[in-house]
């Protein structure tokens, strides 16, 4: 398995500002993923972040709104830019540890935009 | 793309009762996982089960890949089992695109 931490665990932000979420893993992993979970909904993949390459974004998500960094094999950040109340969600990072498609999730960041 | 369905969408159980949750998927998959999201939002890995049957305490899961479904069994339910249960699949045709089902919301009452 993997131990994954996220910072911050929750935040309340003003409309128009940006928030950077950090994801730290206790072992080196190739594949890291960022998800969004809107209230009462399932998880939606935002992007895949591989070290040494640009993140790959899913349909409906763009780099200008959700820039991602992946500076090494144990760390990644997701920035939610120019926030609006519609961005209020739980943001989760996950990793694939054993290269067998099995994923482990961090505890999530609960974001409220007012 | 692949479709993932879960049933029932909502379930209320008396403590001690048993239940079966179902996940149907429309195409071949490399992996299927079951997760429990507790009331605090934490996603907990329950099973990694692309095929076959596994058991872990009061929980067990079966995936019949050829028929494209998976079942999660909860026996002797406890109030701590409350939360949302998700199945998630890795389609064979799309390596990086994990698809989550809509979830089953379970409430166990004393």
Image (spheres, rainbow, N blue to C red):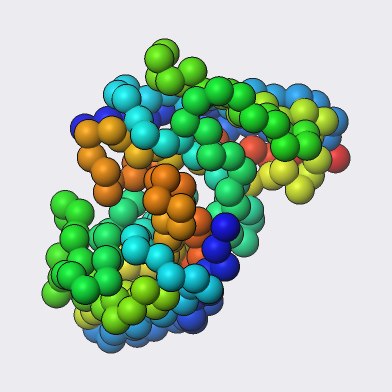
For residue B26, say whether it is visible: yes
Q: Quadrant of residue A90?
A: bottom left
Residue shown at 43%/60% (left/top)? Answer: A94
Where is the N terminus of chain A found, in terms of image quarters?
A: bottom right
Where is the C terminus of chain A found, in terms of image quarters?
A: bottom left
Residue shown at 22%/80% (left/top)? Answer: A82
Answer with left or right where residue B74 lies relative to residue B103: right
Give percent across and percent down for residue B85: 56, 40
Task: List the single residue furthest toward the top.
Answer: B67
Q: How many marks?
A: 0
Residue shown at 30%/24% (left/top)? Answer: B27
In the displayed structure, A28 sits above or below B108; it is below
In the displayed structure, B30 sits above or below A57; it is above
As rendered, which of A114 and B109 lies closer to the eye? Answer: B109
In the displayed structure, B43 sits above or below A30; it is above
Give percent across and percent down for residue A78: 32, 75
Answer with left or right where residue A4 lies relative to residue A15: right
Give percent across and percent down for residue A13: 39, 83
Residue shown at 22%/34% (left/top)? Answer: B93
Give percent across and percent down for residue A10: 51, 77
Answer with left or right where residue B88 lies relative to residue A61: right
For residue A77, say whether it is visible: no
């Amino acid at each position: 398995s993997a131990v994954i931490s996220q910072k911050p665990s929750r935040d309340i932000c003003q409309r128009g500002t940006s928030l950077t979420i950090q994801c730290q893993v206790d072992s080196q992993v190739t594949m890291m993923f960022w998800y969004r979970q809107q209230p009462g909904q399932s998880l939606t993949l935002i992007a895949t972040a591989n070290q040494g390459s640009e993140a790959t974004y899913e349909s409906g998500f763009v780099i200008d709104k959700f820039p991602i960094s992946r500076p090494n094999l144990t760390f990644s950040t997701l920035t939610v830019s120019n926030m609006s109340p519609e961005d209020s969600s739980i943001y989760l990072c996950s990793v694939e540890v054993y290269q067998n498609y099995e994923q482990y999730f961090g505890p999530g960041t609960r974001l409220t935009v007012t | 793309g692949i479709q993932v369905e879960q049933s029932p969408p909502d379930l209320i159980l008396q403590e001690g009762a048993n239940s079966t949750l179902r996940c149907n998927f429309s195409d071949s998959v490399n992996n299927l996982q079951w997760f429990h999201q507790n009331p605090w939002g934490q996603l907990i890995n329950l099973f990694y089960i692309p095929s076959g049957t596994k058991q872990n305490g009061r929980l067990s899961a079966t995936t019949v890949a050829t028929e494209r479904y998976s079942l999660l069994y909860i026996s002797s339910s406890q109030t701590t089992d409350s939360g949302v249960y998700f199945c998630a699949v890795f389609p064979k045709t799309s390596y990086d695109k994990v698809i989550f089902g809509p979830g089953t919301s379970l409430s166990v009452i004393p």
